[in-house]
Image (tube, coloured by chain):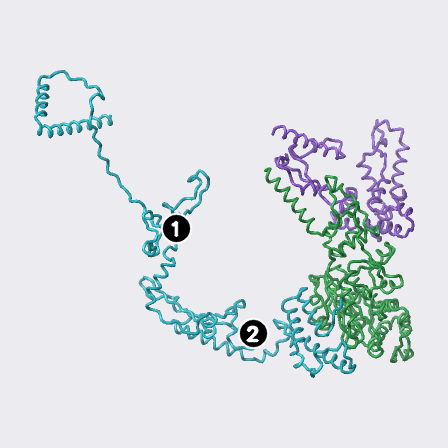
């Protein structure tokens, strides 16, 4: 009996010991004075301030040394990524009174590819994949900001699933082709998003061919993009056509005039998988629409095919864009399906991993720095380790857990 | 050997007695304990555990109590008041949902306060702002606690409302109940966590429906003070 | 009562014996004659009996002859010389015999310490050892002796068949038949007519289609893990007939699998068991993409960032598929579909695409 208790205690002790040893030694470990750790939540006194920020605000200059560090996105560049961002992130940024993103390896890899790219070749496709909440979307935002600084035109679909899912959504027969369907509201929304992202660049761009909307209305050769957007916003009926025109013009001008175009599509698998009867978009006759029948999706699919040059397509697959019974895996082909793979192949898959230990620590330290983690125990060394363990270092899980502390 | 055993036993007794002193209960723990007095308190501190036991330690020969929840659970995710509040809010055993509501409530409070904190420039002003959502929640509950309540006493066929001192547990229950009820009365389309956030921030500033409810109860007690001797 | 009777009896016998001893000695000496006379006279005169004090007179003690009892010789292993021939001791298979086994051995189960003093029983009269079969008749010495005896009947092993691989190569078809001998009223055995042949599927000349069809035709006679095909038959009354029959089956299935029926043309990509790159859209996209890139490279004439491995050749499907870069890409895609997606297979795919499109990662 006695021996067994002794064994139990020592085995527990050795287990906890090994747990401590496994993790990186962060600070000098000061033993707790109190017997129970519920009351032992005192902040370690000589805790070193682990750097969680970098002063390098230009994403083009980020290198491997900056991995895991936060950089501040300047206010004027925030406009590029702001409209496409999830409200949850925006709220956090508002509370923190600054907009910071973490430099992560996949973004650097993307930047590495872009630097060495031969733009005369047909558009290369990059596909980000990773577990839920591992930071695919923010990686896209990081890259967008990077390209924006380089003077690229950005074509961004923030959440493609919105275009194929339908709840009480207005669907109109396309004015261009009768077997396609327009989403006037979504197209208008995208037009404003596009205008906000490329502010200042669009007025210089002119159309190269004539577009006739109706008998009386038409866009002459040399109409600026700005005017087309305004037309689309004022005449919602033609907003989808305006999107098509803009995308086509961008492809043509990239090819001929050397315009650099970055196409970013989040949750691209929504373009290729069919939604179930309940959630899919339906037309006026209650017939379920395939994604290809929607003019917005059709036009964006063209941007992803390697028929034009001077551009890059960066996509991300996400489980949320699939039906609920097709979310078991996070790998691209499972999510895209055969059709999606054939459309994008050959693409470069880039894995977005969960946080490394350094990144997770940096995240927690950033939260502490912004006064976000209020729990005293959460600020201790042990508390940080526990947070990392409980969240399994998944960025979204970590943020969710830290939100209540 | 015998003397060593005695001294160890006395040390252990000391441990047990100290354990008793930490509890808030007024009833001696030994009277309510399901454990035989031979059982010793568990050790949860990791440093002590890692040291192991000495050969002549008495704990080799004694059974150990199971640690209670509030001791063994991480302080990151456990607070007694929050737990109580969550359970009181629960309907039909749907705990998952109320926990989510509580989580969002704390998040909302934190968002409000942290935003203020990060926007103020000076340290002096910053120190004025309380950011800890649990502290705010506790203070709000504290502000809603009634000191007195009334009981119904029937004397010679007449029912009187007799003011009495409220017990601490009763105080906490009343305060939380009023906060929850005042939120349930509000607009149904607004999420519960948002209503709770407003209510708690109001109560934190000694305003709002729940605080008014407390004042109402105090007023009734005041008006019935003549019957205080009847209890 | 019984014990006292037996005591009397022995005394009587003793007395008789004493007397006979006396008699034999008296014949030889005169003194003994005198003594004899005296005794007779004393008997005659009926004197008082002399009181004999016990232990005063020396009595010659005669040893009692031992009773007969069964005596066992010591166990055989005690007398065994260390250099004996074990095959003589244990010539054939037999039950364990404790006395003939010279080494210590224990077998059995002791439930508690009170049973057999807690020790596992030794070999002496150990039933547990007798129950199980033993291999004491199959020692290397035995085998050697056996081999020596039957060597007389053996022929020379053919040359060039030293290893199993060589045997497999020159004799790919392995046929198995069995004969049964036993003591009984009938000489025939049902099992003796069974014949089977076994071969590796890779030894047959088959193309992709034929191989696939062959596997479908033979069903579970093909083992995908080992690659063996086994045909077995017992339907004919004679062994030789069965053997012929399985060989016929092999021939029939082989030629049948080479045939292409009209309905086989209807097989579509989605019916394929395995992903074959050449038949899929991926190969067409790859060829068109490469030709597009080549055209663009030619148009620009820029050396930098050019697809160097395409420089000389004409781009068409047959040329492209022989390029090492494309081969690697093809393998990666097939892996991705056939082995399933994982971070590893996706990374190999990524490497292959990087090489295919000449994308460099600059970190």
Front residue of this view, candidates B96 and B81: B81
Give percent across and percent down for residue C122. Answer: 40, 45
- Identify the hue of chain A: green
Give percent across and percent down for residue C125. Answer: 36, 45
Task: Determine whether label 1 and label 2 are within 8 Å by CB.
Answer: no
Residue lying at 68% horizontally and 39% vertically, measured from the top left = B43
Looking at the rendered image, the disc whose residue lies closer to the viewer, 1 or 2, is 1
Front residue of this view, candidates C358 and B216: C358
Disc with the residue nearer the chain's start (1 vs 2) = 1
Residue highlighted by disc 1: C131
Q: Quadrant of residue A152?
A: bottom right
Front residue of this view, candidates C299 and A154: C299
SS state under label 1: helix
Q: In this view, does A139 lie to the left or right of C147?
A: right
Disc 1/disc 2 C-alpha distance (Å): 52 Å
SS state under label 2: helix
Give percent across and percent down for residue A267. Answer: 76, 65
Image height of A142 relative to B21, above or below: below
Q: Residue A343 carries which label?
A: none
According to the colouring, which chain is purple?
A: B
Q: In this view, does B216 lie to the left or right of A131?
A: right
Image height of A371 relative to B25, above or below: below
How many marks the image carries: the answer is: 2
According to the colouring, which chain is cyan?
A: C
Q: In this view, does C108 lie to the left or right of A149?
A: left
Chain ID, mark 2:
C
Residue highlighted by disc 2: C212
Image height of B21 relative to A297, above or below: above
Q: In which quarter of the image is residue A174?
A: bottom right
């Amino acid at each position: 009996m006695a021996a067994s208790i002794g064994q139990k205690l020592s085995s527990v002790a050795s287990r906890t010991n090994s747990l401590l040893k496994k993790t990186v030694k962060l600070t000098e470990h000061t033993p707790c004075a109190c017997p129970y750790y519920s009351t032992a939540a005192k902040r370690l006194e000589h805790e070193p301030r682990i750097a969680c920020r970098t002063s390098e605000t230009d994403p083009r200059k980020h290198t491997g040394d900056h991995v895991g560090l936060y950089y501040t996105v300047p206010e004027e560049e925030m406009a590029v990524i702001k409209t496409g961002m999830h409200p949850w992130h925006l709220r956090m940024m508002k509370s923190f009174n600054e907009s910071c993103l973490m430099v992560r390896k996949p973004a650097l890899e993307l930047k590495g590819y872009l630097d060495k790219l031969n733009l005369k070749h047909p558009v290369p496709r990059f596909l980000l994949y990773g577990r839920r909440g591992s930071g695919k979307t923010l990686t896209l935002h990081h890259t967008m900001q990077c390209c924006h600084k380089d003077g690229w035109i950005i074509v961004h679909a923030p959440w493609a699933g919105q275009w194929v899912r339908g709840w009480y959504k207005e669907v109109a027969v396309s004015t261009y082709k009768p077997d396609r369907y327009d989403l006037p509201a979504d197209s208008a929304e995208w037009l404003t998003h596009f205008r906000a992202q490329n502010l200042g660049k669009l007025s210089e761009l002119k159309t190269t061919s004539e577009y006739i909307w109706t008998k009386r209305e038409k866009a002459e050769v040399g109409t600026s993009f700005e005017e087309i957007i305004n037309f689309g916003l004022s005449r919602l009926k033609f907003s989808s056509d305006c999107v098509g025109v803009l995308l086509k013009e961008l492809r043509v001008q990239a090819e001929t005039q050397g315009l650099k175009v970055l196409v970013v599509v989040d949750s691209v698998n929504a373009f290729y998988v069919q939604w179930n009867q309940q959630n899919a978009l339906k037309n006026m006759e209650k017939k379920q629409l395939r994604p290809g029948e929607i003019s917005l999706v059709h036009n964006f699919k063209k941007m992803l095919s390697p028929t034009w040059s001077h551009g890059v397509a960066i996509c991300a697959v996400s489980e949320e864009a699939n039906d609920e019974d097709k979310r078991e895996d996070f790998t691209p082909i499972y999510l895209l399906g055969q059709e999606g793979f054939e459309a994008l192949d050959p693409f470069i898959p880039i894995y977005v991993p969960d946080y490394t230990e350094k990144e997770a620590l940096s995240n927690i330290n950033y939260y502490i720095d912004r006064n976000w983690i209020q729990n005293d125990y959460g600020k201790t060394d042990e508390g940080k380790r526990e947070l990392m363990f409980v969240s399994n270092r998944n960025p979204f899980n970590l943020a969710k857990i830290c939100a209540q502390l | 050997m015998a003397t060593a055993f005695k001294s160890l036993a006395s040390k252990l007794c000391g441990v047990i007695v100290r354990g008793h002193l930490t509890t808030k209960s007024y009833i001696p723990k030994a009277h309510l304990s399901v454990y035989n007095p031979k059982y010793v308190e568990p050790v949860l501190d990791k440093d002590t555990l890692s040291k192991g036991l000495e050969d002549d330690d008495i704990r080799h020969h004694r059974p150990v109590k199971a640690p209670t929840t509030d001791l063994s659970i991480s302080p990151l995710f456990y607070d007694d008041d929050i737990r109580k509040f969550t359970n009181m809010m629960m309907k039909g055993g749907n705990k998952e949902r109320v926990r989510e509501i509580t989580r969002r409530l704390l998040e909302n409070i934190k968002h409000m306060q942290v935003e203020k904190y990060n926007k103020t420039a000076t340290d002096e002003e910053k120190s004025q702002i309380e950011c800890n959502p649990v502290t705010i929640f506790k203070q709000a509950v504290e502000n809603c606690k009634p000191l007195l309540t009334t009981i119904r006493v029937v004397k010679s066929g007449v029912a009187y409302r007799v003011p009495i001192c409220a017990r601490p547990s009763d105080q906490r229950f009343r305060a939380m109940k009023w906060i929850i009820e005042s939120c349930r009365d509000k607009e149904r389309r607004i999420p519960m966590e948002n209503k709770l956030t407003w209510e708690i921030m109001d109560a934190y500033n000694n305003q709002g429906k729940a605080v008014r409810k407390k004042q109402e109860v105090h007023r009734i007690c005041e008006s019935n003070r003549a019957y205080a001797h009847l209890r | 009562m019984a014990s006292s009777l037996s005591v009397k009896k022995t005394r009587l016998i003793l007395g008789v014996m004493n007397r006979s001893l006396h008699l034999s000695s008296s014949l030889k000496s005169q003194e003994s004659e005198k003594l004899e006379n005296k005794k007779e006279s004393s008997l005659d005169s009926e004197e008082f009996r002399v009181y004999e004090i016990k232990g005063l007179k020396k009595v010659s003690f005669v040893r009692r002859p031992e009773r007969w009892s069964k005596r066992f010789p010591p166990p055989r292993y005690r007398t065994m010389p260390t250099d004996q021939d074990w095959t003589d001791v244990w010539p054939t298979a037999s039950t364990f015999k404790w006395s003939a086994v010279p080494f210590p051995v224990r077998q059995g189960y002791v439930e508690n310490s009170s049973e057999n003093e807690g020790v596992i029983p030794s070999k002496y009269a150990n039933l547990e050892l007798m129950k199980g079969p033993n291999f004491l008749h199959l020692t290397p010495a035995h085998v050697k002796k056996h081999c020596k005896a039957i060597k007389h009947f053996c022929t020379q092993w053919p040359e060039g068949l030293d290893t199993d691989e060589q045997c497999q190569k020159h004799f790919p078809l392995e046929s198995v038949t069995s004969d049964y001998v036993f003591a009984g009223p009938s000489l025939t055995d049902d099992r003796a007519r069974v014949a089977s042949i076994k071969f590796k599927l890779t030894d047959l000349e088959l193309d992709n289609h034929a191989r696939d069809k062959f596997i479908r035709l033979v069903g579970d006679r093909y083992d995908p893990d080992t690659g063996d095909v086994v045909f077995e038959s017992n339907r004919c009354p004679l062994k030789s007939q069965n053997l012929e029959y399985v060989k016929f089956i092999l021939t029939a299935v082989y030629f049948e699998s080479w045939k292409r029926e009209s309905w086989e043309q209807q097989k579509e990509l989605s019916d394929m068991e395995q992903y074959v790159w050449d038949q899929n859209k991926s190969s067409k996209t790859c060829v068109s993409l490469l030709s597009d890139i080549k055209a663009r490279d030619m148009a620009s004439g820029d050396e930098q960032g050019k697809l160097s491995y395409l420089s000389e050749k004409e781009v068409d499907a047959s040329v492209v598929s022989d390029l090492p870069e494309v081969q690697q890409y093809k393998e990666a895609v097939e892996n991705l579909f056939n082995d399933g997606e994982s971070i590893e297979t996706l990374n190999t795919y990524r490497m292959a695409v990087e090489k295919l499109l000449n994308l460099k990662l600059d970190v």
